[in-house]
Image (spheres, helix red, strand yellow):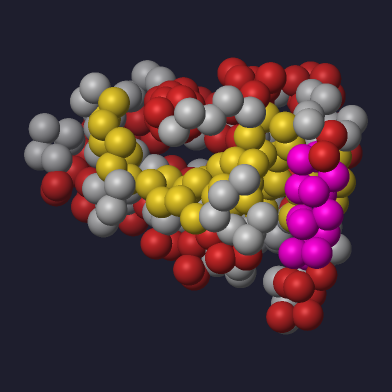
Amino acid sequence: MPVFENGAVKIYYEEAGSGLPLFVIPGGGLNATVAGLATHAFNPLEEFSDQYRVIALDLRNAVGSQAEGPLEIERTWDAFTDDQLALLDHLGVDRFLVMGFCIAGPMIWNLLKRAGDRVMAATLVHPSGYISSHPDIYYNNNMQKWAPEFTQRHPEVTMEMASEFLHNMYTRRADFVFTVDRDFVRQCETPVLVLPDDIPAHPYATAMETALLAPNAQVSIYPWKENDRKIALALNHIRGFLALNARAA
């Protein structure tokens, strides 16, 4: 079970396959882990390892993970991006394709902001984003599901500190995709494929807004998770999108 140590941070990751790197960020909020990919509509480690070097990691401080490090209250999203780029550097990866679920949507936009020249194409699967009808959903969910177990495991971190972290991550960024603004998306030339969902934590309107703004965006069929046949069609779309952008590189 490979664990990459980067200063005070330990990141658990897994790899499958060979070829062009496909970097995968799991869904599951702040408890996103490689193991959780098995519960997703599809598992990229299984679906794409026949053609790509698939690399997936646990989020720092996910409950039940070996990925641990400081709770960077002021840096939130950027701390996760630090981990992702450090792991890729450690593995000798320069340019890569990226795919992510749920919380990975904002993380991918942050990757594009900070290292856009390294990202060949991005696939955002039921991405999270702000929606005015449920403005506090991420704060409330994480205070209930992530913070209690995390603070129990790390007694040096109080619930008040966890609350401040979540406010900085979500409440004080309560717009769009949290990590970038609309002007950034309008100017982002990186090819993007969006597979939207329509639940409060994966708002359809926000996902579609990113697709409509990004100049080189594509959108999957919708809804795409209703049955195995629709999932297969969505996977065909992803495979074509990845192959096209792999050739372009």
- Apparent side of residue 206 relative to residue 57 in the rendered image (left or right): right
Q: Which is the main secondary structure of the residues drawn in magenta? A: helix
User: Which residue is at the front of the view, 132 or 40?
Assistant: 40
- Apparent side of residue 192 relative to residue 151 in the rendered image (left or right): right
**Residue 246, how many percent across, how many down?**
77, 40
Residue under the point 58% across and 25% down: 94
Residue under the point 69% across and 19% down: 117
- Apparent side of residue 148 relative to residue 202 in the rendered image (left or right): left
User: Which residue is at the front of the view, 5 or 219?
Assistant: 5
Position of the C terminus by quadrant: top right
**Residue 85, how many percent across, how many down?**
48, 27
**Residue 17 appears in which quarter of the rendering?**
bottom right
**Residue 232 appears in which quarter of the rendering?**
bottom right
**Residue 199 appears in which quarter of the rendering?**
bottom right
**Residue 53, how many percent across, how many down?**
57, 48
Residue 182 seen in this snapshot: yes
**Residue 59, how many percent across, how many down?**
39, 43
Residue 129 seen in this snapshot: no
> How many tags in the picture?
0
- Apparent side of residue 75 relative to residue 3 in the rendered image (left or right): right
Please check the rendered image and state whether residue 243 is part of the magenta-colored stretch, yes or no: yes
Please check the rendered image and state whether residue 164 is part of the magenta-colored stretch, yes or no: no
| Depicted 22 relative to depicted 180: above or below | below
Give the magenta range: 234-246
Name of the residue lying farthest toward the left: 155
| Depicted 199 relative to depicted 158: above or below | below
Residue under the point 85% across and 44% down: 244
Residue under the point 17% across and 35% down: 158
User: Which residue is at the front of the view, 166 or 224?
Assistant: 224
| Depicted 176 relative to depicted 51: above or below | above
